[in-house]
Amino acid sequence: MTDPISLAAEEWFGIKADPGDVKRLQAWLCESYGGESSDILRKVFSSGEAAAFLTVNETYFFREPLHFTFLLDLLPVFQKSSLNPSLRICSDAVATGCEAYSIAMLIEAYNRARILEKEKPLSYHIDAFDINPKVIEAACQGLYNPRSLREDGSSFHYMANPYLKKLGTSAKGTGQRPEGVYLVDSSLRENIRFFVHNLMNEIPSINSDLGYDLIFFRNAFIYFTPQNRGRILSNLSAALKDGGILMMGVSETAGANPPDMEAKNKGDVFYFQKPL
């Protein structure tokens, strides 16, 4: 018989919970609430508290660099389109925010080159969300350890350099920030909105009449149950404007079939596009 937490994880979050994660959540519920009644489960799942135990938050800057090369190629196309006064991007299941900040860093690098050429920079806005309130809080703080800068994204690290400040050494036992922590420059937050959202529900767009030009939904699809994957893809498709593009993880694209979207590729990059 399936335990109540696993059933709630599928009902509320759409995922198949790892048994080890379920045990950790059970222990926390007993310690914090004295049990796992239906009312308690409803409270911790509806608030997103349970997500801190049941979701995977693996992320780092410029993960899967092919997608960022593709984005860099797309920016002039968006720049030339009279239908795009401002580029609207959504970063879904963003965890601690590395993906959203990476997108912003790339666009800012593009804009610096535009300004040097005395061309108009590209206006943009990024919505970034996760179901876990704790990781969204971390994203807003913008503090990252060296593991967030991995070798497979190193070809883009020069774009991060102007926006990552390495903090000084802290004395041991003081509770202060550890040595080697990087702080993201607050200027990047001007065009990013971080918020908590459950992908099982419709995605709240910047403007309900417009939708997004581009959605990044990478390396999260695999955690949803087969029964819920169609619902997730429908919500993603509905949030895109006509002609909008959905980027999924390299290993996930083959197993996805978003409604009302066409599978396409450019070189080694596979993506989905909503017809105009």
Image (cartoon, helix red, strand yellow):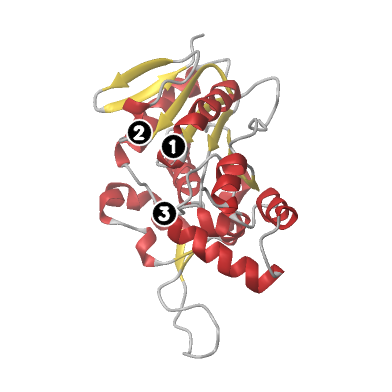
Mark 1 or mark 2: name the one nearer the start of the chain: 1
On the image, the x and y values in percent for residue 41 come to: 68, 54
Observer-nearest of 198 and 169 = 198
Q: Are marks 1 and 2 in contact (CB under 8 Å)?
A: yes
Mark 3 or mark 2: name the one nearer the start of the chain: 3
Query: For numbered disc 2, what is the local secondary structure?
Result: loop
Mark 3 or mark 1: name the one nearer the start of the chain: 3
| Residue in the image at 52% along x and 44% along y | 93
Q: Mark 2 Cα within 10 Å, few/some/many (few <14, many 20+)? A: some
Which residue is under mark 1? 221
Observer-nearest of 265 and 104 = 265
Residue 135 numbered tag: none
| Residue in the image at 42% along x and 38% along y | 218
Give the amino acid type for the residue marked by disc 1 in the picture.
Answer: Phe
On the image, the x and y values in percent for residue 132 come to: 59, 53
Which residue is under mark 2? 252
Q: Is residue 109 above or below residue 85?
A: below
| Residue in the image at 51% along x and 51% along y | 97
Which residue is under mark 3? 58
Observer-nearest of 236 and 165 = 236
